[in-house]
Amino acid sequence: MTIEIKDVSKSFDGQKVLDNFNLNIESEHSYILTGPSGCGKTTLLRLILGLEEPDNGTVKLLGDYKYPFINSGVVFQEDRLCEDYDAVTNVTMISKKVFRQTVIEELKKLLPEEALFKPVKELSGGQRRRVAIVRACAIPSDVLIMDEPFTGLDDKSREAAIAYIRNKQGTGPLVITTHDTKGLEFGRLIDLGTKT
Amino acid sequence: MPKSIRRIIAAAAWIVIWQLAAFIVHNRILLAGPADTVIALAGLVQTGSFWGSVWQTSARILLGFVLGSVLGIVLAYFAKHEIWLEDFLRPLVSALKSIPVASFVILLLIWFGSRNISIVICSMVVFPILYLNTLEGLKSTDVKLLEMAKVYRMPGTRLLRYIYLPQLKPFFKSAFKLAIGMSFKSGIAAEVIGQPLGTIGNGLYLSKIYLETAELFAWTIVVVLVSFICEKLISLLFDMI
């Protein structure tokens, strides 16, 4: 499976954030998008997810594809968790194919056990981020898309989260945006500041 | 002093003021006192028709309440997704909110007869309350969570349970509490005008005709009590969810 991004341009309020951008995102590869704030990292992820339409150019899904839309595991720039529910429920709610016991085991890999059953509004920023990461990896997906997934994580938690994500990547591509590329050398670095 | 004690003292003070006013007026037709009202209520409770009237009125009002609520919630859901429907319903909702119940009752008496008038009136009073509150609640639902649900293709039932309902709960709670009180007020007003036999409205009307002010107050207390119980049950239900 390949996501072909061809000659894509996107502007907001007359401000061009992507200008004739090209990239092929291929299975089993990892892409680390970096660059200064406002350079279009989040916009690019939203274009891939079909949450934004490009002003020009195309985002196409090529190859053998199971779904009419991209089947993705996503960590958004914000956590986007349901505040009154605990971490386990926030993960299990996304699909009936996600089983509670499995989710508990997965969350335990990144979070202390006492954090699993508290409403997520009571968790720290880093803990909430890890819940979002586990949710993104909870169901098999064709692509993992993560927008600044390590925000608020200390070095040890970040390392554990990177290992967890890599373990869950499967055969699909992984796309991560970040300001800090430490520990992400396994992926192809794309600096959107220079607009490839 | 605990809040509940303060409230009881305040209520007791008003009963004393009421009794004093009755003493001063000294005319049971103009103003029956609390003691006369309690005696009249005790007399009413012992009659066979009392419980029948309470049941007939409450059942019709609650049926109207449910019908108006369902209609309001369902139409709000569709109006949220179809702007033309929201525009189309806006004048109707404004009219239902502002036209006095009495104006409707006379027309509806011709269309539906007096028997079911409180059902229709309650539906018409409840509908705009539930419609507007549900629409506002749906519009204030976090779009970022909805986007997350779209990306994960969350099934509709889960979307409703985990995203819509928690956001709608405060809107529903205030709307239902307001609507139940309004239902009893408007439903009984409709019964007083339409006078269907064996209802609280009919009892109130007869009290007025025979200048039985104590009985009028007794029926009023019954209405307030039933409405209060329904409102508390709604609060309890929402606290349990």
Image (tube, coloured by chain):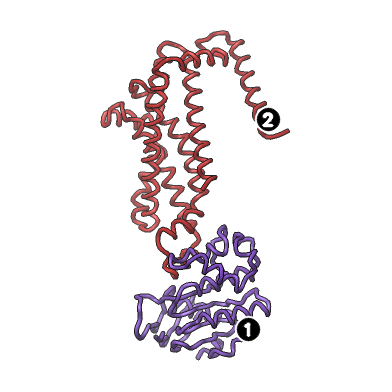
Q: Amino acid at mark 2?
A: Ile
Disc number placed over residue A180 in the picture, else none? 1
Quadrant where the N terminus of chain B sits is top right
Left or right of A118: which side holds B72? left
- Color of chain A here? purple
Q: Are marks 1 and 2 on the same chain?
A: no
Q: Chain of mark 1?
A: A
Q: How many marks?
A: 2
Secondary structure beneath dot 2 equals helix
The one nearer the camera, B102 or A92, is A92
Q: Position of residue A135 (x, y in %)?
A: 52, 70
* Label 1 Cα crowd, 10 Å radius (few <14 / some 14-19 / many 20+): few
Q: Nearer the viewer, mark 1 or mark 2?
A: 2
The quadrant in which residue A185 appears is bottom right
Query: Eyeballing the image, is A67 above or below B180?
Result: below
Q: Position of residue A1 (x, y in %)?
A: 39, 85
Q: Amino acid at mark 1?
A: Asp
Residue at point 48%, 24% (across, down): B222
Residue at point 42%, 11% (across, down): B210
Left or right of A72: which side holds A113? right
Left or right of A109: which side holds B152? left
Query: Eyeballing the image, is A118 above or below B50?
Result: below
Q: Position of residue B81 (x, y in %)?
A: 38, 58
Query: Eyeballing the image, is B163 above or below B191?
Result: below
The quadrant in which residue A48 appears is bottom left
Chain letter, colour red in render:
B
**Residue corresponding to mark 2:** B5
Disc number placed over residue B114 in the picture, else none? none
Residue at point 63%, 66% (across, down): A113
